[in-house]
Image (cartoon, rainbow, N blue to C red):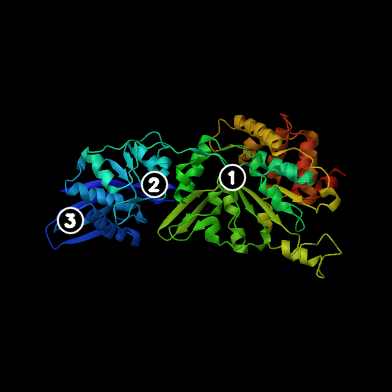
Amino acid sequence: MVARALTVAFVGIEARLVEVQCALSPGLPSFQIVGLPDKAVSEAKERVRAALAALSVALPSKRITINLSPADMPKEGSHFDLPIAMSLLAALEIIPAEEVSDTVALGELSLDGALVAVTGALPAAMTAAEGGHTLFCPAPCGPEAAWVADTRVFAPATLAQVICHYTGQAPLSPAKPGEVVRDIAARDLFDVKGQERAKRALEIAAAGRHHMLMVGTPGSGKSMLAARMPGILPDLSPAEALETSMVHSISGLLEQGGISRARPFREPHHTASVAAIVGGGKGAKPGEISLAHNGVLFLDELPEFPRMVLETLRQPIETGEVVVARANAHIRYPCRFLLIAAANPCKCGYLSEPARACARAPACGEDYMGRISGPLMDRFDLRVDVPPVAFNELDLPASGDSSAVVAARVATARSVQGARFAGYEGLRVNADAEGALLEEIATPDAEGRALLTRAADRFGLTARGYHRLLRVARTIADLDGVEGVRAPHMAEAISYRLMGMADAVSG
């Protein structure tokens, strides 16, 4: 007799069904696991043996073979413990084999039979729902998996509870979804004194998901401004929350099964490696750009990042996804993020202040900013100079709009874009528009087109720069509540594309 249970193997954020087959056959007593298991899966036999012994279940003096099918797919992780134990219990006729064969299970076993939380419960529940299967997972993972309403989720705390459920001694109740996480209130934009131009650029970036670069002396408020971006972004839609939670589930970042409607804000240090930023390492896990999916990726001290790390951002910025290529697999992760970067103008940071600049000025500024390649710089829609704030301005009362007021304008502009792209799959904001659709929605009036033409001719805009100007101008018009793109919208977009360009073009 061959007893079967189901589990999943993770390929990126996709959970693929794996059949766990258990056969008891005559021969020398042994316990083998086949089907390309990694070290953690191979060690499952010892954890299963100890857990069953803790329940006073003795293994027979037979040859026990566990096959993980399909056998040519690599199996990684400790979540195979529970399905292996369930298939073995079914082979021993302790629990009904028919019911176990239609159950997807995942969970790590401790030596006393307790179930330990594992990552990936949410994508596993989605795969179980697609096949019409029931899901068993550890108690801490139940609230997370229960967000998928199309499948029954049971979350036992121990292996003994699994046995009692199947034997009818103590049936389990379906798990309930976790609470929607309410994050602590974000920092208020009203606290930032001065920097009105940077605040305006921050609002435009939030409204259309346009990438933004801030350049300024140390202490001018670049990081302070970036930290207030989450406070002006709208909450995640249900579809976006599910997409983001899938990535965070694989990475083990969902706390107590709660799903957050707040957009993620990731700020990796400039010493981060390529694998940490774009994904990779053991198991090809998601990187920071995928953990920032549908949210914000803030790169402080941008020129200090290794050149290779910066260059790997170019393709994900354009496509909204990254492919982590390995010899035995190509894993695809979503990474549609809003990039906010900050940089000093030079190594010493005081290039714009002759009294404090180093002896190598201005050559030091060219060398320092030259660490950012032209193709990467071309992908920033908004480039803002953030000058230092005078001491006398710090004593003045705060001015400008609060984050709540700005967030309301951003939400209105986002709702306009949502209605505009309602019939287009994968399009949500102006930054997603391209081709004929972009020309249709962002073609400026005659004066605006003349302004754009002069800018393109005089400053040698690339085709990418041209289209990004159209997208930014469209967002500015949405913030103004105007249907068509006009010359003032185009002029403001140009002024953010290259510092000081608007005056030169209009002159």
**Disc 2 designates what residue?**
15
Q: Secondary structure at mark 2?
A: strand
Q: Residue at x 73, y 50 (%)?
A: 383
- Left/right of residue 95 with respect to residue 492 in the rendered view: left
Q: Nearer the viewer, mark 2 or mark 1?
A: 1
In the image, what residue type sits under mark 3? Leu
Q: Nearer the viewer, residue 437 or 292?
A: 292
In the image, what residue type sits under mark 2? Ala
Whether 3 is drawn above or below 42: the answer is above
Q: Nearer the viewer, residue 469 or 17?
A: 17
**Disc 1 designates what residue?**
295
**Disc 3 designates what residue?**
59
Residue 404 x/y as whole percent: 68, 36
Q: Secondary structure at mark 3?
A: loop
Which of marks 1 and 2 precedes in the sequence? 2
Q: Nearer the viewer, mark 3 or mark 1?
A: 3
Residue 217 has which mark? none
Mark 3 crowd level (few <14, some 14–19, many ≥20, 10 Å Cα): some
Q: Nearer the viewer, residue 30 or 390?
A: 390
Residue 476 x/y as whole percent: 72, 37
Residue 82 x/y as whole percent: 30, 50
In the image, what residue type sits under mark 1? Gly
> Split into 4 quadrants, where in the image is the C terminus?
top right
Query: Separation of disc 3 and disc 2 at Cα?
Result: 31 Å
Q: Residue furthest left?
A: 26
